[in-house]
Amino acid sequence: MTTLELNPAAIATLVHTFYDDVRADPELAPIFNAAIGDQWEPHLARMVEFWCTVMLGHKSFQGNVFGTHMQLSGVEPQHFRRWLDLFLATVQRLFAPEVADEFLIVARRIASSLQYGYFGKVVAQ
């Protein structure tokens, strides 16, 4: 398989591929669909901006990731495990190991922060 070069187009591929998997996942789809509703396209565009800001240093994303996620209800520890598993599989499928590892560092850091907010501890890495 060819690995993608880290650039905005590759990040868009990652975001769309990953969220296609999330939307098809029986554990995660209900949580995400309840939160996002029919606003998937704006959400995906926002996630591309987020990952471009984090991974490429772009300044296009403005927002409060923690505060936005703390407003969601029904989030359980197994949702973090599943999200991380799907994200890991997607970045490893699309990128060279060293790039996938960089994505995973960020994803695990975000997941840990959110888990502290929801549960007072990290339950999945």
Image (cartoon, helix red, strand yellow):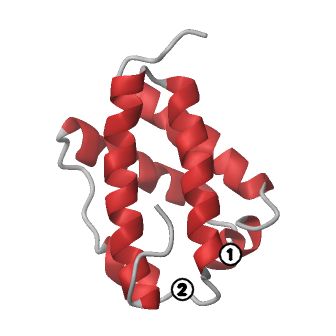
Residue at image position (60%, 38%) is 89
Residue to which mark 2 is pinned: 72
Q: Residue furthest top?
A: 2
Where residue 88 sits in the image (x, y, percent)? 53, 43
Classed neighbour count for the residue bearing mark 1: other residues with Cα under 10 Å, few (<14), some (14–19), many (≥20): some
Q: Is residue 85 left or right of residue 112?
A: right
Q: Nearer the viewer, residue 20 or 113?
A: 113
Q: Quadrant of the N terminus?
A: top right
> Is residue 7 at least partly visible in the picture?
no
Residue at image position (52%, 59%) is 43
Q: Is residue 59 left or right of residue 15?
A: left
- Can you tell which quarter of the image residue 33 is in? bottom right
> Is residue 37 at least partly visible in the picture?
yes
Where residue 15 sits in the image (x, y, percent)? 52, 43
Where residue 124 sits in the image (x, y, percent)? 50, 67
Q: Nearer the viewer, residue 59 or 80?
A: 80
Residue at image position (65%, 72%) is 78
Q: Amino acid at mark 1?
A: Ile
Q: Helix or strand or loop: what does disc 1 sit on?
A: helix
For the image, the number of numbered tags is 2
Q: Looking at the rendered structure, which numbered label has been put on residue 31?
A: 1
- Can you tell which quarter of the image residue 29 is in? bottom right
Q: Amino acid at mark 2?
A: Leu
- Can you tell which quarter of the image residue 38 is in? bottom right
Of the numbered discs 1 and 2, the one sitting upstream in the chain is 1
Contact, mark 1 vs mark 2 (Cβ under 8 Å): yes
Classed neighbour count for the residue bearing mark 2: other residues with Cα under 10 Å, few (<14), some (14–19), many (≥20): few
Q: Nearer the viewer, residue 16 or 106?
A: 106
**Please, is residue 108 above or below residue 34 in the view?**
above
Where residue 57 sits in the image (x, y, percent)? 17, 41
